[in-house]
Image (cartoon, grey):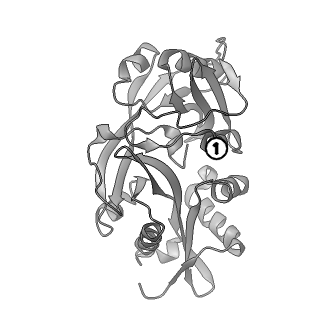
Amino acid sequence: MSGYELAAYVPAQREDYLRLLREAWGEAALSGAEFDWWFSRNPAGSLMSVARDGDRVVGVAAHSLSRMILGGEERTATFSVHATTDPVARGRGVFVGLERKHEQEAEAEGAAATFAFASAPTAPLFLGPLGWTEVGHLRIWARPLPRLSLRRAGDRIERFDFEGDAAAGWPNHVVRDAEYLNWRYLDSPRDYVAYRAGEGYAVLGHKRHKGQPIAFVADLVGPLRPLLRACVGGVKSGTRALIALPGHGEHAAYLSSGFVPTPMSLHFMGKPLAGELDPDRRAWRFTLGDTDFF
């Protein structure tokens, strides 16, 4: 722990934070507009910290607060997001120090648990010195696409305006009310479009992944096949594949819509701050939009 200081993030460090993200992730890093949207407009709030070595910011990290249904009750939880360490400070415990700081702050805020979709470098740190619990790998599925699609997209949603949690029947999950969905997708500077089918909705996103244009089902609640058809119809010409994260019991519908499992997965893990953490992967339901990188 010697040699650097942990402190709360202040707006004057915005460019330092963005610089470290760009150095770590290149074109996949948050833009300035995405940074401001994600951290300033999240209705549930954020925890943000930096590590300083003298006047130099050598590490950054954040936890996004979320309203979740955990064990059938609405609770606050946090997700570890957008963290990286300057190469000059690697091996000095910066990441672990920042995460411990946020765990303590989350517990003080009354959060029931903290979670992450961990990367390969961070997973051993979460599971080792931080003492987190692995829940499992969530398999990503993909549908290869022709270079030109003539399908028709579904009915667009300009704003979400319903009451309550759209995913009320799901197991442990992020609460999806209109305020959250409008912030997370429709107010985002990222490329999202929402479609309606019956009483449900789907959100389609586009991005570049390893230099290739892809589309992804960011969120989907409701009748699977018509909503998946809407997403396929909304994919931009030239997109190489449409990817998604099917939930438990949804695989047959995805197979019938042309999706197949891929080698890619999300490494989900967490740590209880109050009560217990259910380690059964089937007790959790996430979509790609529940991550910070889709």
Report which residue position mark 1 lands on: 179
- Residue at 36% in and 17% down: 252
Left or right: where 14 falls relative to 293: right
Q: Secondary structure at mark 1?
A: helix
Asked if residue 154 can be seen in this view, the reply is: yes
Of residues 294 and 92, which is closer to you in this image?
Answer: 294
Of residues 234 and 186, which is closer to you in this image?
Answer: 186
> Relative to residue 40, is residue 285 depicted above or below?
above
- Residue at 64% in and 12% down: 151
User: Mark 1 Cα within 10 Å, few/some/many (few <14, many 20+)?
Assistant: some
> Residue 141, percent across and down?
42, 29
- Residue at 46% in and 27% down: 142
> Residue 294, percent across and down?
55, 42
> Relative to residue 260, is residue 37 depicted above or below?
below
> Residue 274, percent across and down?
34, 62
> Relative to residue 274, is residue 254 depicted above or below?
above
> Residue 183, percent across and down?
66, 45
Total tally of numbered discs in the picture: 1
- Residue at 60% in and 44% down: 180
Left or right: where 128 falls relative to 202: left
Q: As shown in the figure, which amino acid type bears the numbered disc 1?
A: Glu
Quarter holding the N terminus? bottom left
